[in-house]
Image (cartoon, rainbow, N blue to C red):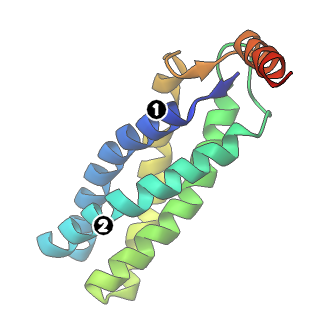
Amino acid sequence: MKDSNLRSFIKGVSWRIIGTIDTFILSYFIIGSVKVATLTAFTEVATKIILYFLHERIWNVIPWGRQKNKPAHLRSLAKGISWRFFGSIDTIFISFIYSGNPLGSIKLGTSELLTKVALFYIHERVWALINWGRIFEKELIEVNISSQKNSL
């Protein structure tokens, strides 16, 4: 089982909506500025959709934790932790650019470790229930056979 590029993209968009709301709320409470919270949250829309898509494509080639019809819970957790590492670095960097507050930016990035891993895990489990955009082993074999016939 693999995920199509379009599935990865749509997952990225749905996750970014959740992530943007979380970043805005945390940024407002930690930095204390609606302007900085808004700039940080909306800049991340662009940076994180790209980063998330790349993260999904990397995980797409890692077979560990893939079961026959859906990913294992441990795989979802590992993806959440690995994503959070890159996501927190991005958040800290963007927040610092807009706020000039290194300590507040680090607090924001570390606060997201808790909220975002939990939210990401839930997001992954919901998407595990959705088969749209999934390419199952039988389909992969049929596509490979068709490709070989067409190249002859």
Question: Of 29 and 55, which appears nearest the observer?
Answer: 55
Image quarter of the N terminus: top right
Q: Does 149 appear above or below 99? A: above
Indicate the amino acid at tag 2.
Thr
Image point (53%, 15%), residue name: 131
Image quarter of the C terminus: top right
- Under tag 1, what secondary structure? helix
Q: Does 70 appear above or below 93? A: above
Name of the residue lying farthest toward the bottom = 100
Q: CA distance from mark 1 to mark 2?
A: 24 Å
Indicate the amino acid at tag 1.
Ile
One can see residue 55 in this view: yes
Which residue is tagged 2?
A: 43
Image coordinates of residue 72 in percent, x first then y, are 68, 25
Quarter of the image holding residue 75? top right
Image point (60%, 50%), residue name: 55
Residue 87 as seen in the image, left or right of residue 144:
left
Q: Residues within 10 Å of mark 1 (few under 14, many from 20)?
A: some
Q: Residues within 10 Å of mark 2 (few under 14, many from 20)?
A: some
Answer yes or no: do the residues labelled 1 and 2 have beta carbons within 8 Å? no
Residue 130 as seen in the image, left or right of residue 108:
right
Which residue is tagged 1?
A: 122
Residue 39 as seen in the image, left or right of residue 138:
left
Image point (46%, 40%), residue name: 9
Question: Of 22 and 136, which appears nearest the observer?
Answer: 136
Name of the residue lying farthest toward the front = 152
Question: Of 80 and 15, which appears nearest the observer?
Answer: 15
Image coordinates of residue 26 in percent, x first then y, are 29, 61
1 vs 2, front mark: 2
Picture disc at residue 45? none
